[in-house]
């Protein structure tokens, strides 16, 4: 009886830890509800086989983070350097750590008049970095960049056959998990100038999920109290039998 109760205690603790991780994820989603191009994250729970220190194998709790790549809504800004991808695809970015991808199109110019992200990373075109040396910037729906009526480049917008090949880095950047397996593929898209894609976080649904998790967490805590009481009763009875 005591052994079974102990296993129940272990599994309850694993559930509490998984719920705590999900709660942290919801908090992070809510904190980024106003972050341009942010993609919310969910946690999935599944059972895994655990074998440790030579003990018999048992089924435990596992947690996996999944990014929701659904697009956010459009927000008009009228800024010529604010861009939104209408459809699938990602802006291709040159970061210090290598090529990265993002849906956040809140761009600006650096000192060399190169198009950069809010973090200062270069936005890539088909010819490399995009230099906007002029007074009027117009970007067509096909991603063609024109400066003072003259085409200078075309935005490098790519997609991937499997979105799971991307892993989140920071708030709104992605990188390939395995460049040898996942490859960029051409994407049909429409660029909207003067618009930004908002976060795809739904505040109401996240708050509802948070309240559900809070109630579940309290339930698991009560389970621990019950198991602890059962263990105490078992030890007391064994003590009386021994005497």
Image (cartoon, rainbow, N blue to C red):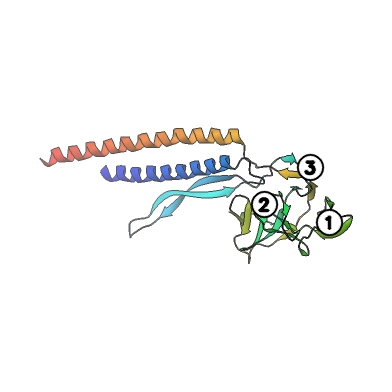
Residue 75 visible from this viewpoint? yes
Where does residue 165 sit, x and y in percent of width and height? 62, 57
Residue pointed to by mark 1: 134
Where does residue 242 sit, x and y in percent of width and height? 12, 42
Closest to the observer: 145 or 201?
Answer: 145
Which residue reaches farthest front?
Answer: 111
Where does residue 106 sit, x and y in percent of width and height? 71, 48
Closest to the observer: 105 or 41?
Answer: 105
Mark nearer the N terminus (2 vs 1): 2
Q: Callout 2 environment at 10 Å: few (<14), some (14 to 19), or many (20+)? A: few
Q: Callout 3 environment at 10 Å: few (<14), some (14 to 19), or many (20+)? A: few
Whole-number angstrom distance, CA of label 3 to CA of label 2: 17 Å
Q: Residue at x 73, y 44 (%)?
A: 196
Residue pointed to by mark 3: 78
Which residue reaches farthest left?
Answer: 243
**SS class, disc 3:** loop
Marks 3 and 1 close (CB-CB < 8 Å) = no
**SS class, disc 2:** loop
Whole-number angstrom distance, CA of label 2 to CA of label 1: 21 Å
Marks 3 and 2 close (CB-CB < 8 Å) = no
Which residue reaches farthest bottom?
Answer: 180
**SS class, disc 1:** loop
Left or right, 103 with reference to 236: right
Q: Quadrant of residue 208?
A: top right
Q: Quadrant of the N terminus?
A: top left
Mark nearer the N terminus (3 vs 2): 3
Mark nearer the N terminus (3 vs 1): 3
Left or right, 80 with reference to 40: right
Q: Residue at x 56, y 36 (%)?
A: 206
Residue pointed to by mark 2: 118
């Amino acid at each position: 009886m005591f052994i079974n109760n102990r296993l129940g205690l272990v599994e309850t603790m694993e559930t509490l830890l998984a719920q705590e991780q999900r709660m942290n994820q919801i908090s992070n989603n809510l904190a980024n509800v106003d972050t341009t191009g942010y993609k919310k994250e969910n946690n999935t729970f599944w059972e895994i086989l655990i074998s440790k220190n030579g003990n018999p194998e048992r089924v435990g709790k596992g947690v996996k983070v999944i990014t929701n790549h659904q697009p956010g809504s459009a927000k008009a800004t009228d800024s010529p350097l604010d861009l939104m991808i209408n459809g699938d695809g990602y802006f291709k970015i040159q970061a210090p750590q290598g090529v990265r991808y993002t849906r956040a199109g809140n761009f600006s110019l650096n000192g060399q008049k190169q198009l950069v992200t809010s973090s200062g990373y270069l936005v890539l075109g088909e010819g490399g970095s995009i230099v906007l040396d002029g007074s009027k910037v117009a970007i067509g729906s096909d991603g063609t960049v024109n400066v003072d009526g003259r085409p200078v480049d075309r935005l490098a917008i790519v997609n991937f056959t499997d979105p799971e090949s991307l892993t989140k880095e920071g708030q709104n950047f992605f990188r390939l998990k395995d460049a040898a397996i996942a490859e960029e593929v051409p994407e049909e898209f429409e660029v909207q100038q003067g618009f930004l894609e908002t976060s795809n976080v739904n505040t109401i649904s996240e708050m509802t999920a948070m309240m559900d998790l809070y109630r579940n967490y309290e339930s698991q805590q009560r389970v621990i109290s019950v198991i602890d009481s059962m263990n105490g009763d078992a030890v007391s009875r064994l003590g009386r039998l021994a005497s």
